[in-house]
Amino acid sequence: MRIARFTTGDDPAYGIVQGDPGSEVITPLSGDPLYIGLQPSGQPPVMLDDVRLLAPVIPRSKIVAIGKNYADHAKEMGGEAPAEPMMFFKPNTAVVGPFDPVVLPAGSSEISYEGELAVVIKTITKGVKAKDAAECIYGYTIANDVTARDWQRSDGQWARAKGFDTSCPLGPWVETELDPADLAIVTTLDGDVKQDGTTADMIHDIATIIEYASAAFTLLPGDVILTGTPAGVGLVEAGQQVTVEIAGIGSLTNTFVRR
């Protein structure tokens, strides 16, 4: 089931996306289904083409991201893959939605894209074992872990490089029924393929990541986990467009701008 957050010009709303590409409709829901379940609002369906899609979730407290979770990406970054999940945070103020601009921050000249599968948490999650991790998952969406590489090198930690405003596009919706074990991830820059990988190549799978993260801190409903990126990351300039496509979910497109 595809659950979107959208607007027709009024307050944001949630809805279920149904139908074939080109003729999809959204059935509006009452409130956030993550908290109150699937309650139809009684409003008539609207065509997907007639709405503006928003980030499908605004994390309640945090985005937990995993670094170097694909061996080929770790190699291209000049190091070995870590033995345990390498975690860092992105703030919820970094989140933007489909087709929203990503604003290149002043003071950085090396901004990179990273297409990733994102996991949305549905329950208060603390000390969960890998075998039970699926019970904590609401669904999956697409992320672009935008990174200021020069800040990443200079700062010694990644808060600024990974957490600046607009550095975490999410979308286009949350897919609640998906097997994430072997999904193609393709990232294009102005239509040219730059990343072409599969989630089957993750070093630490999603269940392992949830166990590891929840051992350290509590995950709350709506929190998002970014699961790492395949090889092929590169720099993006103002005016360029990045699209991340993941099989079974859809695509997430954003244009980069400088203000």
Image: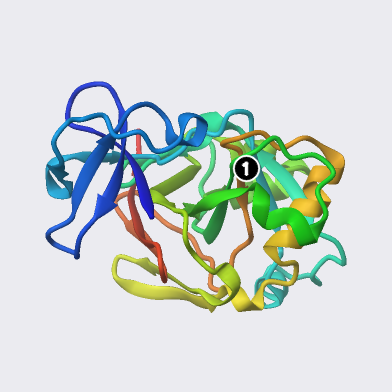
Q: Which amino acid does label 1 sit on?
A: Ala
Q: In this view, does 209 lie to the left or right of 149?
A: right
Secondary structure category for the residue under label 1: helix
* Residue 92 spot, x, y in % from top left: 55, 31
Looking at the image, the residue that sits furthest to the top is 11
Colour basis = rainbow
Number of disc labels: 1
In the image, is 229 to the left or to the right of 22? Answer: right
Q: Quadrant of the C terminus?
A: top left
Q: Which of 16 and 256 is in front in this view?
A: 16
Residue at which label 1 appears? 161
Query: What percent of the width, then of the height, locates residue 208?
Result: 78, 61
Which residue is at 81% across, 36% downward?
217
Q: Which residue corresponds to the image point at 33% horizontal and 28% vertical from the top-left?
A: 30
Establish if 158 lies above or below 209: above
Residue ID at (53%, 60%): 116
**Label 1 Cα crowd, 10 Å radius (few <14 / some 14-19 / many 20+):** many
Between 250 and 252, which is closer to the camera in this rendering?
Answer: 250
Question: Which image quarter: residue 151?
Answer: top right
Residue 255 in percent (x, y) is at 31, 49
